[in-house]
Amino acid sequence: MDVHNIARRDFLRLAAAGAAALPLAAQGFPAFAADKPWPGLGDAIVINNLGGISNPNVRLEKFKKQKENGNPVAGMKGLALDPRALDEAVASGTTAINLTLGYVAGPMDPFDYSVAEIAKWNQRIRLHGDHLLKVWSTADILRAKKKGKVGIIMGFQNAAMMGDNVDRVDTFAGLGVKIVQLTYNVRNQLGDGSMEAENRGLTDFGRAVVERLNATNTVVDLSHSGEKTCLDAIAASEHPVCISHTGCRALANLPRNKTDEELRLLADKGGVAGIYFMPFLKENSFPSAMDVVLHIEHAINVCGEDHVGIGTDGGTTGVDDLKAYQEVIDDEIRRRQEAGISAKGEKAGVVPFIPDIQGPGQFQQLADMLYSRGHATDRIEKILGLNFLSYYKRVWGE
């Protein structure tokens, strides 16, 4: 088994769903029932600034069959972009998704692999044009809302594909990549990721890439970055930057979460942070939906309500067999740890989503919870998507 051939994207494709089919009480979580549901989701712009579309149940069945044949890893690969996944993405109210493609980790050539992935997603968007459209500008996001489709924002979660050639930024911008995360969890040629103990910061090449990303009106994403890399990049960037998917380290002291200093500096320069629906929201790695709300509220207190959004790091289709899913994820976490690409907080028993806020109803549930705690409609609309829409306009220029 080649543990280095475990892309983060394969890990998250299994997480592109929740445990909607299992009663929440059976999972140890109380179900949330809003006394007065928030009425605005149908009209809202919902931007998931890091998410996915896939049906994990299809892939789980493949995993089971491959396991019987002695090759479970093969069963984990691929994308289950089936009618259920597409329908539930639309039903969730999602307007647009920053969807990870391209190289994240593994032995493949980062540049060649990333170009091929863009071509594959262009083909998928054409094939499923009744549900999807490619986002080049904020006008496309508004068009997706009007047509009842999901806008696909092409994004990278590792800039390793730039090699040592800053001109590749222009190449990828021309192909429609709108968001580039500088590092993943480990060090690359741009800077240190969140799991690097040395915390060395942005390199000279990293500064050159940031400058070129600004010149091409491409979003600089600092999720997964080490603290010094993040602070250096915010200072180096002429444009506001984003942290597409994170939590607040003041509430859960884990490397994947951002400090108040990082969040405040981000906001001071006009950026937006997306709060994820991930186990890193709690130091014991078992958060509930309320932890999502608490992290959003803390981020608002630090950044202001115009600088906070969502980036769930998951999808909108429910897992039908949670027990089988748990087995797959435990195995996947073990192999990520062996490959040296896992984050602190990933461990056996942990799933890469929050069980009581999953499936196509997750955004309505989040809005209901915020509404029940006294957050006004205009603030909820900002959190769900208007803040990122406004941010994209500032960076993309359209």
Image: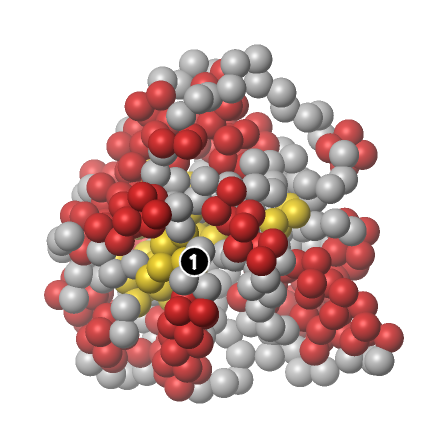
In this view of the protein, can residue 41 be seen by the observer?
yes
The colour scheme of the drawn protein is secondary structure
Q: Residue at x 60, y 79 (%)?
A: 5
The crowd level at tag 1 (other Cα within 10 Å; few <14, some 14-19, many 20+) is: few
View extreme (right): residue: 68
In this view of the protein, can residue 47 be seen by the observer?
no
Q: Number of marks in the image?
A: 1
Quarter that holds the N terminus: bottom right
Q: Residue at x 39, y 78 (%)?
A: 119
- The residue closer to the viewer here, 35 or 329, is 35
Q: Residue at x 69, y 44 (%)?
A: 19
| Residue indicated by mark 1 | 130
- Where residue 372 appears, as percent x and y from the top left, is 50, 16
Q: Give the quarter of the image for residue 260.
A: top left
- Where residue 221 appears, as percent x and y from the top left, is 32, 57
- Where residue 84 appears, as percent x and y from the top left, is 60, 54
- Asked if residue 15 is positioned above or below residue 109 in the image, the reply reads above
- Where residue 193 appears, as percent x and y from the top left, is 43, 63
Q: Residue at x 76, y 65 (%)?
A: 61
| Residue type at the position of mark 1 | Asp
Q: Give the quarter of the image for residue 384.
A: top left
Q: SS for tag 1? A: loop
Q: Is 359 left or right of 41, judged from the image as shown?
A: right
